[in-house]
Amino acid sequence: MLHFFDTNILLYSISRNPDESLKRDRAILLLEEDSGAMSIQVLQEFYVQATRTNRSDAIPHEFAVALIAAWCRFRIQEMTLPVLYSALQIRKTYGFSFWDSAIVAAARALGCERVYTEDLSHGQVVEGLTVIDPFR
């Protein structure tokens, strides 16, 4: 069963905040599975957020690039016109942000059954995908 990782899973996996240690451990466990998927958007968002200078636990460029390379072992969905149009329709139908809609569209394009994220409602079924908040 293929499952899609949202950006927050990747970011928690590198968190050094003691208050996020349980989330970090859970994220690392999820990323050890081989049945994961993500999109170019997720990798881009990870890089921008993980390396931003005002982040208290920012990581260096080289480390972020190495993590992205390691995560490329997962199935990666590129942003294509069909994914873009699907995201726009999902946004219209569900009222999600464009970025959350693009996550759902990418997960659908890959044939995922679940989306791991804390940004949507746990248990919600969207376009045949079940939303799982792994930090609940």
Image (spheres, rainbow, N blue to C red):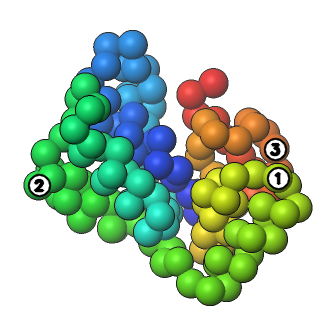
Q: Determine crowd level at label 1: few under 14, some 14-19, many 20+ residues with C-alpha closer than 10 A.
A: few
Q: Is residue 86 above or below residue 42?
A: below
Residue topped by disc 2: 62
What's under tag 1, amino acid-wise?
A: Gly
Quarter of the image containing the N terminus? bottom right
Callout 1: SS: loop
Q: Is residue 103 above or below residue 86?
A: above
Q: CA distance from mark 3 to mark 2?
A: 37 Å
Q: Residue at x 33, y 51 (%)?
A: 48
Q: x and y percent of residue 69 in the render?
A: 24, 65
What's under tag 3, amino acid-wise?
A: Gln
Q: How many marks?
A: 3
Q: CA distance from mark 1 to mark 3?
A: 14 Å
Q: x and y percent of residue 16 in the render?
A: 26, 24
Q: What mark, if any, has residue 124 been given in the picture?
A: 3
Q: Nearer the viewer, mark 1 or mark 3?
A: 1
Residue topped by disc 1: 95
Compare marks 1 and 2 and give the one earlier in the sequence.
2
> In which quadrant of the rendered view does residue 114 lie?
bottom right
> In which quadrant of the rendered view does residue 122 lie?
top right
Q: CA distance from mark 1 to mark 2?
A: 37 Å
